[in-house]
Amino acid sequence: MPARPEPVVRRRPSAAGTFCPVPSWPLDRGWDRSGADVGVAGGHTARGEDDIMGSPLVGDPSTSPRHRRSRVILGGVIALALVVIITIGTFVFEWVVGANWQRPDFPSLAQQPDSSLQGTVAYFADQSRCVRVVAAAGQPEKEVLCVGDQVASKSGTPTKEMGPQLVWLPDGRLEVTMFRLAPADSPSTTTTELPLVAGWQKIIDVRTGQVQDVPAADVPAEPAQTPYPVVSPDGERVSAISESGQTEVQLDNGSGPRTLLSFPAAPSEANYQFGPAFWAPNWDWIAASDGRILIITTTAPSVTRVLRDDARSASLVSTPEFAITERNLLTPAG
């Protein structure tokens, strides 16, 4: 066994003023009480107090793999719960906004007629399923034809009727055309998105109420592509715009657009559709549709009024659910 080194003797003052020897072992080697040199034989060096305090505690649960895994799982559950809460909250908010959104309110020409508005409008009333004509002034009006819920049969296969499409003829009579969905085993020849075949057609003299049946061979198999004027003879262009949170009808005469109608755009949940907007045939006012028939006068300031609120789109082509003639057909002929 190696000889134990002699300690270095330091002196410290005693209570009586004398010095007492205090042994101090070398710091570069470790010795146990038996005198073994653990610094050499054990491959260890002496550890100071700082080394002991800075080391992780043996058995600390916060550093165990199981504890770390539990924290990861808990964090994932919290994140998922937040996503679910945000999603549900967004859905509820959008539903509430859509359920409480209302169409813009405009004065009614039915309640307050305006005799300065010239022309006659034909439209299909949704609930009664009848074709009606009304003066652009708001009154008078009359019912000219009811189509009912008719279902025809072709080769034993029921086919649903679609329409009607309303077109004013040059002589002032009203053309009412109904189409049918083509059966699955019967290819259609129409160019519209719907597979249509010819239904029936009637021509009505709205003054007398006389109804003429068109022969089946002369009934068209697809809707007429009726143009609706957006540019007046003076070059004034009307347009309907719905973007950036606003719905607008504008009139542009070449010097810059002028806004005739503007209101906040509807939320998507409200299923609100606006347009198109176009000139009446007499160029005195502009027609538009949002499920109602709207009449917009272009005076400054412009005025928007509801002609009728029971109109419905025929869902045949991207055209309005009504037709306009410049004639005043419901007033006595002069």
Image (spheres, helix red, strand yellow):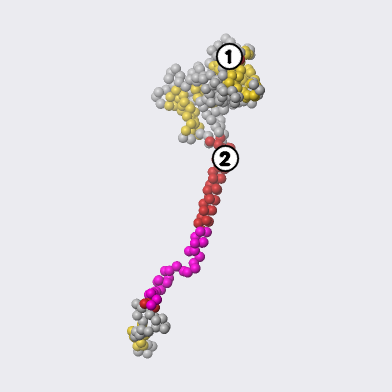
The quadrant the C terminus occupies is top right
The quadrant the N terminus occupies is bottom left
Q: Is residue 270 left or right of residue 34?
A: right
**Dot 1 lies on which element?**
helix
Per the image, is 226 magenta? no
* Type of amino acid under label 1: Asp
**Quick check: can you spot residue 36?**
yes
List x then y, in percent, for residue 16. Answer: 37, 90
| Residue at position x 43%, y 20% in the image | 235
Residue placed most toward the observer, 56 or 240? 56
* Type of amino acid under label 2: Trp
User: Residue 218 shows which numbered tag?
Assistant: 1
List x then y, in percent, for residue 196. Answer: 57, 22
Per the image, is 63 magenta? yes
| Residue at position x 39%, y 81% in the image | 36
List x then y, in percent, for residue 47. Answer: 39, 74
Task: Specify start and end residues of the magenta stretch as a single range.
Answer: 41-70
Between circles 1 and 2, the one closer to the viewer is 1
Of pointers 1 and 2, the one earlier in the residue sequence = 2
User: How far is the residue under mark 1 from the one under mark 2?
Assistant: 49 Å
Quadrant in the rendering for residue 164: top right
Circle 2 is placed at which residue position? 95
User: How dense is the environment of label 2, judged by Cα within 10 Å: few (below 14), some, or many (20 and up)?
Assistant: some
| Residue at position x 56%, y 17% in the image | 220
List x then y, in percent, for residue 246. Answer: 48, 33
